[in-house]
Amino acid sequence: MAKHMTLEERKALEARYNAGQSVPGIADAMGFSFSTIYKELKRGDTGAMDKNGRAGYSGGFTILSSACGIRQTTRRSKEMGEVFKLNHCYNVDCVPAMELFPDDYFDLAVVDPPYFSGPERRGFYGSKVSKIGVHRDYPISPTWSRPGPEYFRELFRVSRHYIVWGCNYFDYKFATGRIVWDKCNGSSSFSDCEIAATDLFSSVRLFRYMWSGMMQGKSIAEGGTMQGNKSLNEKRIHPTQKLVALYDWIFKNYAEPGQKILDTHLGSGSSRIAAYEAGLDFIGFEIDSFYFQLEEERFAEYTSQTSLFHMEGGEK
């Protein structure tokens, strides 16, 4: 059985599903397993209810260029334009999504893909209960998985440049440039630093910013100094969340207003907030519906607050 459905098969699935046919019935009729049909329906979930009172499905959300024969840039652009819009984020699998984009569509991809099994691996994401009694009860994510070679092939095809966090955990040949984020976290159970590979330069760049539970840095310029007012700290909503200030620093130094940015593993949405503030066009993907909803709420709250701030005469 093929790993992915063809475009024609997705159209057939969409027609049968919209006609009210059951998932087991669709699986039998189309010759796919129940799990394959179920996963496809999840990946193509439109976020709205259909006329049968079920979660809506669109085959366009999961079109695969390799299965559909989409090879020419004009075809890719057409398919991408029908599904994805700039400055929007989507609850979809990033690999089939990227396959819809033409070569070098994005100016920069800033990504933080999973490199362990998931939030249940407490040894890699800090203690379940910190030394000061803070609970980190992140739910187990059924969609949390390490990306394979096909992910990196598509990532490097669709973006002119990249920054890949966690590069030291992947057996992949990246460019020689490195960004090191020093978390200034002392004796925390978290890593002292995180490393990203990039093709933007061939040297090593350092960003220092305290990020250890409730101890967070003061500013980009004073990242090693703890924020005095903890009410200004970023709220953690994701087990591998990175701070907005980190992306602010990245975009200030390595992007220009109007450029197109890609984040394939949106997570908490910190990259989206920083791109919004920097005047960058942005597209983000997040396969986990639970964290995607948290990210959407976070971004909506942030933009509503900044809009109110500007209406009252404030400045960025």
Image (spheres, helix red, strand yellow):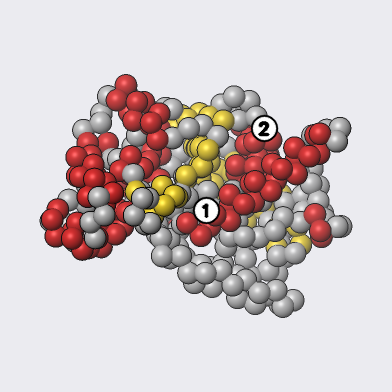
Quarter residue 122 falls in: bottom right
Count of marks placed on residues: 2
Q: Amino acid at mark 1?
A: Phe
- In the rendered structure, the answer to whether residue 6 lies left or right of residue 299 reads left
Instruction: Provide residue 164's location: percent of width, then percent of height.
Output: 50, 45
Tell me, yes or no, if residue 41 can be seen here.
yes
Question: What number is the disc on residue 226?
Answer: none
Instruction: Provide residue 314's location: percent of width, then percent of height.
Output: 85, 35
Quadrant the N terminus occupies? bottom left
Q: Secondary structure at mark 2?
A: helix
Crowd band around label 1 with a 10 angstrom C-alpha radius: few (<14), some (14–19), many (20+): many
The residue that label 1 is drawn on is: 292
In the rendered image of this protein, does residue 118 appear above or below residue 79? below
Q: State the residue in front, 136 or 151.
A: 136
- In the rendered structure, the answer to whether residue 136 lies left or right of residue 46 reads right
The residue that label 2 is drawn on is: 278
In the rendered image of this protein, does residue 210 appear above or below residue 162? below
- In the rendered structure, the answer to whether residue 216 lies left or right of residue 282 reads right
Label 2 vs label 1, nearer the camera = 1
Quadrant the C terminus occupies? top right
Q: Secondary structure at mark 1?
A: helix
